[in-house]
Structure formats: structure tokens, C-alpha cells
Image: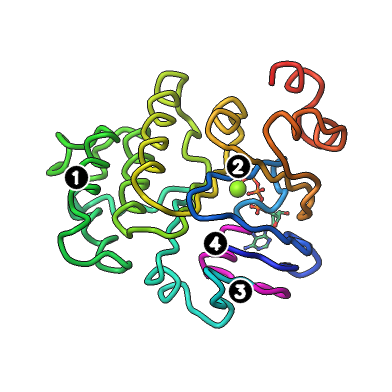
Amino acid sequence: MLELKGVSKTFGGVKAVQDVTMSVASGEMRGLIGPNGAGKSTLVNLVSGLLAHSAGTLSLDGESLDSLSAQERARRGIARTFQNLRIFPSLTVQQNIDVAGYSGAASGREGDSVLQEAIERLGLSDRLNETAGSLAYGQLRRLEIVRAVALRPRVLMLDEPAAGMNDQETGSLAQALGWVRSQIDCAVLLIDHDLKFIMALSERITVLNMGKVIAEGTPKEVSENRQVIDAYLGEDQQQAA
Ligand SMILES: Nc1ncnc2c1ncn2[C@@H]1O[C@H](COP(=O)(O)OP(=O)(O)OP(=O)(O)O)[C@@H](O)[C@H]1O
Ligand SMILES: [Mg+2]
């Protein structure tokens, strides 16, 4: 279980994340939504250790993460993808996957079948020997997810995995993520602006606005929440949800 208690981050005068308390259980897929600049990516950066929090505490299965580096957190199984992709373009797809595995909690061959199937389900099996730089954008996004799966994550944070994808690509991504979830016992934090995608995959959703949690509940509950409608959804989205 991933737990955040009173977590805050300020950049100069900007309160990017303010007093966020939330927990995501292993096996749960949690949606994290909110307007641009709400603090979603910053929250992922705080959990992964890319940024240090200004206040509060973070823990995984009761063990504090507060003093651990990003690398140590990765070794404990905290994996994430980036909103702005971070792939090594001159390495092959296979090499990009291997690099991720070495830095994480993965070891031995026991998990290889899950990783192999992830590669297939995410549509990359016939691309393994191509350089990552030659992949189409949607394939790069899927490669980032395979890399995160290679870490055998206990926490998997996906920052806008469907960004830039068409409806069909988003649909097959949703199917692949459903499979990932059924195979790996981890807490998933899923960020996206595609609400149909988020609502179909998440049993609960946390809503951020200006760094603060303004609502948390089922997709139906948050889509009917007045504060969420005013801050983010608008009336049209509320009706569509
Ligand atoms: N490294 C940084 N230095 C200074 N300010 C930052 C930094 N990273 C984020 N911010 C600011 O923190 C706030 C939250 O940004 P963040 O990127 O977390 O939002 P977001 O919810 O991910 O938005 P989006 O939906 O556009 O991706 C914004 O005001 C942003 O400008
Ligand atoms: Mg973001």
C-alpha cells in the first residue's frame, strides 16, 4: 500500500502540491485527474523521488520512503512513466527494456513470462530489434509502459499514457493496462485527461486542483461532485460521464 500523508511541494512561491493525504492499495487502479497545473505530475515526481517533498511523509507497505533516493525507490519497485517520454532513441527497443530491468527490483527469470507477454500485449514483439528512435509516438508510449513493467513494480505510476493517441489506440491501451493489472500485484496511479479512459479503468478517482485534493470517490461520485464540475469537468463532461 502506497501512503501519502500531508505531502506538500513548493517551487519558490508556487504551491504545486498542498497537504495531500491519500493511499492506494496494492491491486487498486487509482485515477488521478485535475486541470493543467493541478500538481499531478509533481505528485508522481515526489513519489518516485525525482523531487524532494517540502513537507509530509511517504511510505510503501508501512516503510518510509522519505529518505530514499529515486534509485532506491526504483529498487523497491516504484516505477513510473513520464508525461514527456524518456526513451533512449539510439538503443533498440529490447535494450531500452533491458536497461529498465537492471535498475529495478526485477531479478532472475521467474518474471520473464510476464514481461514477454507485456511486450506482446503492448504490440512491441516485432519491433524489439529496431532502434527506439524509429518507433511511432504511440509505440513509444507503450514502450515506456513495458519498461515500467520490467521493474516488477509494487507501485506503477502512468503519467498521461493515452496522450496523443486516437480512440482505437486508447482502447487497446486500456485493454493492455487491464491485463497488466491482472498480472502484477501493484498499486497503479493513472493520470490522464481522457476521462472516458480513466473512468473505465479506475474504481476510484482522486481529483487535484491547485495542488489540493478536492474530491475522491468512484467515477460516478467524482463526476457528480459540484467542486469537480466547477474546477475541471464543466457541465458537458459531467453529462457525458
Ligand atoms: N520543476 C518545477 N519548477 C517550478 N515550478 C514547477 C516545476 N514543476 C511544476 N511546477 C509548477 O507546479 C504546478 C503543478 O505542475 P504539474 O506539472 O505538477 O501539473 P499537472 O497537474 O501535471 O499539469 P498537466 O495536466 O498540464 O500535466 C504548476 O504551477 C507548474 O508550473
Ligand atoms: Mg502533468
Structure colour scheme: rainbow
Where are the magenta residues, as a range? 43-57
Where residue 210 appears, as percent x and y from the top left, is 79, 51
Question: Seen from this angle, which residue lies furthest left?
Answer: 129
Numbered circle sitting on residue 1: 4
Query: Label 4 amino acid?
Result: Met
- Residue visible at 76% across and 33% down? 221
Query: Which residue position holds label 3?
Result: 52
Q: Is residue 150 left or right of residue 221?
A: left
Question: Seen from this angle, which residue lies furthest bottom?
Answer: 67
Q: CA distance from mark 4 to mark 1?
A: 26 Å
Q: CA distance from mark 3 to mark 2?
A: 23 Å
Label 4 SS? loop
Label 2 SS? strand
Query: Which residue position holds label 2?
Result: 31
Query: Label 3 amino acid?
Result: Ala
Among numbered discs 3 and 2, the one appearing first in the sequence: 2
Where residue 37 appears, as percent x and y from the top left, is 71, 48
Where residue 155 appears, as percent x and y from the top left, is 47, 58
Label 1 SS? helix
Q: CA distance from mark 2 to mark 4?
A: 15 Å
Query: Which residue position holds label 1?
Result: 116
Query: Label 2 amino acid?
Result: Gly
Among numbered discs 3 and 4, the one appearing first in the sequence: 4
